[in-house]
Image (cartoon, rainbow, N blue to C red):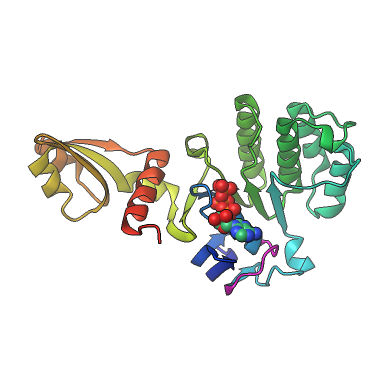
Amino acid sequence: MSTVARVDGVTKRFRGVTALDGVSFELQRNGIYGLLGRNGAGKTTLMQVMTGQQVPSAGSVELFGGHPYENAAVLGEVAFIKESQRYPDNFRVRDALTAGRLLFRYWDEALARSLVRDFDIPVKRTVKKLSRGQLSALGVTLGLAARAPLTFFDEPYLGLDAVARQLFYDRLLADYAEFPRTIVLSTHLIDEVADLIEHVLLIERGRLVLDERAEALRGQVMTLTGPSTAVDTLTANTDELHRERLGNLTRATVRGRVEPGDARAAGVELQPVSLQQLVVRITAATVQKEPVP
Ligand SMILES: Nc1ncnc2c1ncn2[C@@H]1O[C@H](COP(=O)(O)OP(=O)(O)OP(=O)(O)O)[C@@H](O)[C@H]1O
C-alpha cells in the first residue's frame, strides 16, 4: 500500500470559527473513502485545505509527496468536484468538457461522452441554464472522466434524482474497477453509498472521530437487546454508543467484541448496525462527551 495524501495535525480557523481541529489521517492509493459528517462538520473545508484552496492555520498537508499550494505538479494529479463550481458566463456544456480535456491530464473523452449521453446532458446549452440536476451530472461527468489519481467529490449528488444517483454510483464503481484510484466522496446519503465505500472518515465539529475500514466497522458495532443484567455483563468491556432501558430490558449499541454464542446463551439478541446508524450513534456519543462551548 502506498500513501497518496498525508494530513498532519491540520487546524483551520476562520474568524471565530474552528472549522478543523487537529485533523490527521492518510489516504492510501486505490480506495474509495466516504467523508461523512453533519452539516458544518468541516468536510468541505478539509477538501479545500487538501486541494490547496485554503491554507491551514496549523498543521500540514502532503499530496503525492509535495504540498498542494500552487503546485501544478501535485494539483495535476487531483480533481475536486463541488456543487458550487463556477463556470464562466456563456460557457456551454461542451466548453466545460473541452476545459476538462485541457485541464485534466488523464482525461478520457470516450467516458465523458458516454456519461453525457447517459445523464442526458444538453451539450449545446449554456451551463447557467442547466437544471440543478443537470449541473450535478456535469460535475460528476467531469470528475469521473478526469480519472485523476486523487479525486474529491463534495456532495456531488445534489439535485440528482434517485435514478441519476444510482447511475453515478454504478458508473463510479465500474470505472474504479477498471481504473483504480483514490476517491473521496463526501455525502450525507450514507445508506446509498454504504456498499460503495471501503473506508470511512467521520468528522464531527472539525475533529476526525472515525478513521476505519468499512469492512472492519461492520463487525465491530452491534446492538444487543435482552435482559438488562445480561446486556450489562456482555457489554462490560465495550465502548458504549447508545443505551436505552425499558423495564428489565436493555438495548445497547456498542463498539467492541461480543461473542454471538455468549449472547445466545444469555438470551440476548445481537444485531448488526448499518453504517448510517453507526454514524448517527458515534456522532451523538461524541456530541454528548463534548458539550457545545
Ligand atoms: N470562509 C468561511 N468563513 C467563516 N466560516 C467558515 C468559512 N467556511 C466554512 N466556515 C465554517 O466552518 C465550519 C465547517 O464548514 P464546512 O463547509 O467545512 O462544513 P461541511 O461539513 O462541508 O458542511 P455541509 O455538510 O453543511 O456542507 C462551519 O461552521 C462553517 O460555517
Residue that appears at 31% across and 46% down? 221
Residue that appears at 70% across and 68% down? 68
Prevailing SS of the magenta stretch: loop
The range drawn in magenta is 51-58
In the displayed structure, 280 sits above or below 201; it is above
Q: Quick check: 292 left or right of 90?
A: left
Q: Is residue 265 visible?
A: yes
Q: Position of residue 277 (x, y in %)?
A: 38, 39
Give yes or no for residue 107 being in the magenta stretch: no
Residue that appears at 56% across and 60% down? 28
Q: Is residue 42 visible?
A: no
Instruction: Locate the N terminus by quadrant.
Output: bottom right
Figure disc tally: 0
Q: Position of residue 101 (x, y in %)?
A: 85, 48
Looking at the image, which is closer to me, 48 or 195? 48
Q: Quick check: 209 left or right of 128?
A: left
Q: Position of residue 179 (x, y in %)?
A: 67, 47
Residue that appears at 72% across and 49% down? 147
Q: Quick check: 197 left or right of 183?
A: left
Instruction: Locate the C terminus by quadrant.
Output: bottom left
Q: Position of residue 263 (x, y in %)?
A: 15, 40
Q: Quadrant of ligand 1?
A: bottom right
